[in-house]
Image (tube, grey):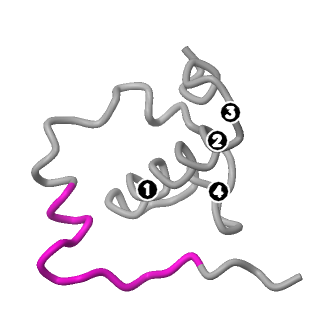
Amino acid sequence: MAKKDCGTRFDADNSLETFFAQAPQLNPNAPLIKGAVCGIRVEEIENPLMQKIRYLDKLVDELAKRKALEKILRT
């Protein structure tokens, strides 16, 4: 089975860097999100922007599996 292409290219006018810069704030429990996305553990990512992106990836993945938001954010 081929590994999923997780993509790394973003449009310069609509970047995730801009998205996070303009967002009011990340959920304070976001750092409690644990696990791997595309083989990378979100809790081990050192680049703050990439970690925020992977938090969203993991959140979407878990919600798609019908996991409760409270369990994902460990609240």
**Of the numbered discs in the image, which one, if any, rests on residue 62?**
2
Pick whichever, 29 or 9, lies toward us: 9
Q: Magenta span covers which residues?
A: 6-19
Badges 4 and 1: C-beta atoms under 8 Å apart? no
Query: Would you call the spot at circle 4 few (<14 residues within 10 Å), some (14-19), or many (20 or more)?
Result: some
Residue type at tag 2: Glu
The residue tagged with tag 1: helix, strand or loop?
helix
Query: Would you call the spot at circle 1 few (<14 residues within 10 Å), some (14-19), or many (20 or more)?
Result: some
x, y percentage for residue 62?
64, 41
1 lies left or right of 64: right
Q: Which residue is mark 1?
A: 51
Q: Residue at x 10, y 50 (%)?
A: 22
Which mark is in front, 2 or 3?
3
**Of the numbered discs in the image, which one, if any, rests on residue 71?**
none
70 lies left or right of 25: right
User: How far is disc 2 from disc 3 in space, using C-alphas?
Assistant: 7 Å
Residue type at tag 3: Arg
Q: Which residue is mark 4?
A: 41
x, y percentage for residue 37?
64, 60
* Residue 8 colored in magenta in the image: yes
